[in-house]
Amino acid sequence: MTEPAAAVAVRRRWNWWKIGFFAMLIAFEVAREFAVLVSAEGVQPTASKMIYGDSAYVIARGRWLRSDGGSQLTPGVVTIECRKDSQQCLEASVSTYQKGFFPPELDWFPATFTPQGVSYVNDNPTCARYAVHIDLMQQRAFATRDRKANPANEVCAKLEPRIAMELGDGYVSDPHPFKGHFVPLLQILVWALQAGD
């Protein structure tokens, strides 16, 4: 059975190797753009927010997120365990830097217990003082970081005077993932999808 002359003419007219070359070029570019975005994302520690308390102890876990509208804090996770019998809280925290983690920090702090929750102050850092309150009635944990009035270190003067925080879930997505990256095909794709809505 022979092929119709019209089909042969169409097959000869199209340069399929050129179409295949450009299709592969576009596929490689999309893969490159995804790789750029994934490598630029950085480390995102995850810990689901949890607050629990009974007559003997209080536990809070999650990530400190700004509640005063400022820029994001350095990603990290924290677990706080407070024991009523010792009137102390153990705070274990891990922070990140770019693609790595700092060693965990463990500290004990004297705590004040009430039927509504527990509070303590972390005055250990050179530059700042942290006041933490775990509210069992609202199932929320709050903290404020106040810059110390006369820091011994000049770097401390660059800190914001006050930051308000609340314990939340670990992962925080970037609202502007394309900012600072050359990813034209993904930007066109997102624009087309948003225009279709």
Image (tube, grey):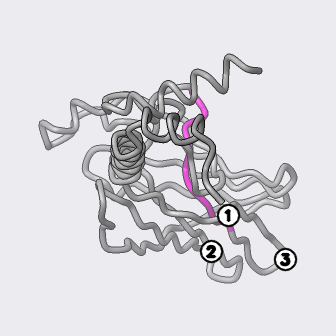
Sequence-wise, the earlier of marks 2 and 1 is: 1
Q: Classify 10 Å Cα crowding around label 2: few (below 14), some (14-19), many (20 and above).
A: some
Q: Nearer the viewer, residue 163 or 9?
A: 9
Residue numbers of the magenta segment: 60-68
Who comes first in sequence, dot 1 or dot 3?
A: 1
Q: Position of residue 29 (x, y in %)?
A: 35, 43
Q: Are marks 1 and 3 in contact (CB under 8 Å)?
A: no
Look at label 1 and name its amino acid. Ser
Q: In which quadrant of the rendered view does residue 194 lie?
A: top right
The amino acid type, in three-letter code, at marker 3 is Ser
Query: Distance between the Cα atoms at labels 1 and 3?
Result: 23 Å
Mark 1, residue position: 48
User: Residue visible at 32% across and 33% down?
Assistant: 181
Q: Estimate how packed mark 1 is, as few (under 14), some (14 to 19) or many (20 or more) residues with alpha carbons within 10 Å.
A: some
Badge nearest the viewer, 2 or 3: 2
From the image, tell me which residue sits under label 3: 55
User: How far apart are labels 2 and 3 at the CA level?
Assistant: 13 Å
Q: Amino acid at mark 2?
A: Glu
Who's the residue at 77% across and 21% down the image?
Answer: 197
From the image, which quarter does the N terminus lie in? bottom right
Q: Is residue 194 above or below residue 174?
A: above
The secondary element bearing badge 1 is classed as loop
Residue linked to disc 2 = 81
Secondary structure under the numbered disc 3 in the rendered image: loop
Q: Is residue 74 visible?
A: no
Q: Nearer the viewer, residue 145 or 71?
A: 71
